[in-house]
Image: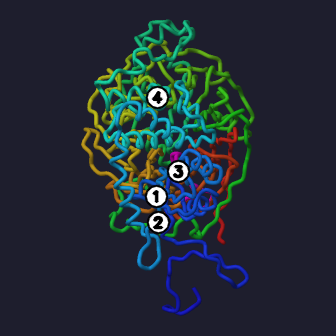
Amino acid sequence: MTVPLGTMRATGDLVMVKDGEMFFLGRKDSQIKRHGKRLNIELVQQVAEGLQQVESCAVTWYNQEKLILFLVSKNDLVKEYIFKELQKHLPSHAIPDELVLIDSLPFTSHGKIDVSELNKIYLNLKPECKLNGKEELWEKLQYLWKSILNLSEDPLKVSDESLFLNSGGDSLKSIRLLNEIEKLVGTSVPGLLEIILSSSILEIYNHVLQTVFPDEDLVFSKNCATKRKFSDIYQEETSGKSLHQKSVMTLNYNNELTAFTTVSRGSQILSLNSKFLTKLGLCSSAQSSDLISQTNIQNMKSLNPPALIGKSKDPSCTAKVSEEGTYGTAAKKMELHVRWRSDTGKCVDASPLVVIPAVDESSATVYIGSHSHRMMALDLYSGKVKWEQILEDRIESSACVSKCGNFIVVGCYNGLVYVLKSNSGEKYWMFSTEDAVKSSATMDPTTGLLYIGSHDQHSYALDIYKKKCVWKLQCGGTVFSSPCLSLIPHHLYVATLGGLLLAINPATGNRVWKHSCGKPLFSSPRCCLQYVCIGCVDGNLLCFTHSGEQVWQFSTSEPIFSSPCTSASEQEIFFGSHDCFIYCCNMKGHLQWKFETTSQVYATPFAFHYQEGGDEMLLAAASTDGKLWILESKSGRLQSVYELPGEVFSSPVVWESMLIIGCRNNYVYCLDLLGGYQI
């Protein structure tokens, strides 16, 4: 930076300077982004060359989608042995997709490895990889299984009953397995992702077999698959039909109203005061416009400066992309300090729900569950445990509060939806679905109904006061994400791992429209007055009108699991991607800025108004490596970064100057946001 222009030029060589000497590390053009992480493919080559049996080798990034290792061996090699050795010395994102044995490496006239010739060699091998029968399909499926799960042991055969998630798989690895299987068979396999996530390798094989070799006899009959079993006491609910049980506790809306504000992931804030609740009544004769004015305007007043309420400026004036990246220097600096942390016993992947009673804000409560089966109520300000309830299985679903404020609703891996008393954690009602519930419930403030999805491919509308299921709808795929409610028009949006986005009439459960996005939807839909947006595994953020017309799509380079978050003015959309960026788009789908983090972004960002630091609009986001990023929401400029001691899949929630988030080191954290001083 101090030499005159033209004195030096970029050569593409990466070096380390030590004691006045430069040590060659590799080439810049050898760096790739794979599985959301940076990788220098020369590292793979160096490790492979270090193996005693390898004479020479080369690595290519074939079509920017497959990492291929070409080997010249000193003796006959067993590929499984080489994979095992590589797994000992390389991180999972650096393990090659395929090994190709060749007699000698091709070189250019300049003495460099001829990458184009290597790619031709691999291309010529591809016809030989076509499946010759169901036996070869079974062998290759086992190979993909072991490769993607990075299994160090070397069994000749994977157990028929092996489950992907129990063997170390996760949602991202399941997408990799899906893509590899479809590449292997040369066609899309409908419904495969749901089978991968819930069934054994033998059932996965059988499902693929039906698509690729429909005339072959099946090794495993689908009808004989073991279904998830529930205790007999839940069998009446399991049918999903309306249940006409009387409530043990009758609630009178007019006499037992609890005015409160709830804060949940993605800047979702709902303020229900006594006047508003009384006006709504049990079945709500209030118009949707009353709801919008009461809730949204109050949200804007509490979280955003008045200047943001109104029309947006000309996008041409603001559509600047931040190229400063992760390490831009902010004009102001914020610090994050742990206020309290609470041990839940196991990983916390759920996102917090904060409920603030209007009569006594100091008694605000954080509700959150964990993989330890515990559902906990924690004092927002001190972290003191108010109560905890042990459920029958893991909790990944985030909690939702009932319209009256007296109940907390949460889904569980055992297929049950639990309704707990918010002041004690006592079980009030349990509704059973046919498979795991990782979806988080959504409450309709006009009717009090709660909507939730299940891995059994259904969405449910529950009346917790009458203890009955009002309706259930077959959604055509596993419902992993959380439903989203629009008041104008009155639509419920549900997304499936089969790639469908559905608009549903919340009163009847009838489908209004559906759109096939082509790839699985782990992201939850998010709607505003004009549009509904959702992230897709193919790396696109999709935007639709409320009538189902696709307006635009914005593309990233990796899957989007993060759910969109809108600003209070509904002029910006924030979301993260597995390409390690946090994005901000305007409502026309144009990029405003993007910010590079140090890992994949799975969680949903949270936009908030920070008065302590001089009336700023900020954005909180988390990357999976445990880092919390505080950015200026208008520019994407970095304000602060804080690293938690574990991976993070939970989404941050901010109230006043406190940020609450779950971590995979078993703790829930509350951090104080301090700052706004000049540096």
Question: In the rendering, at what x and y percent does residue 403 appear?
Answer: 50, 26
Kindly identify the amino acid type of the residue bearing the numbered disc 4: Met
In the image, residue 610 lies in the stretch drawn in magenta: yes
Mark in front: 3 vs 1 = 1
Q: Residue at x 36, y 68 (%)?
A: 317
Q: Name the N-terminal-most of marks 3 and 2.
A: 2
- Crowding near the residue tagged with mark 2, few <14, some 14–19, many ≥20 C-alpha atoms within 10 Å: some
Q: Name the N-terminal-most of marks 3 and 4.
A: 4
- Crowding near the residue tagged with mark 3, few <14, some 14–19, many ≥20 C-alpha atoms within 10 Å: many
- Residue tagged 2: 105
SS at mark 1 in the image: loop
Q: Name the N-terminal-most of marks 4 and 2.
A: 2
Q: Is residue 9 above or below residue 28?
A: below
Mark in front: 4 vs 2 = 2
In the image, is 567 to the left or to the right of 648? left
- Residue tagged 3: 601
Give whichever of 38, 536 is nearer the camera: 38
User: Which residue range is magenta in the image?
Assistant: 597-616
Q: How far is disc 2 from disc 1 in space, using C-alphas? A: 7 Å
Q: Is residue 80 above or below residue 618?
A: above
Kindly identify the amino acid type of the residue bearing the numbered disc 3: Val
Give whichever of 110, 271 is nearer the camera: 110
- Residue tagged 1: 102
Mark in front: 3 vs 4 = 3
Q: Which secondary structure type mostly characterizes the magenta part of the structure?
A: loop
Q: Residue at x 31, y 26 (%)?
A: 505
Which disc number belongs to residue 199? none
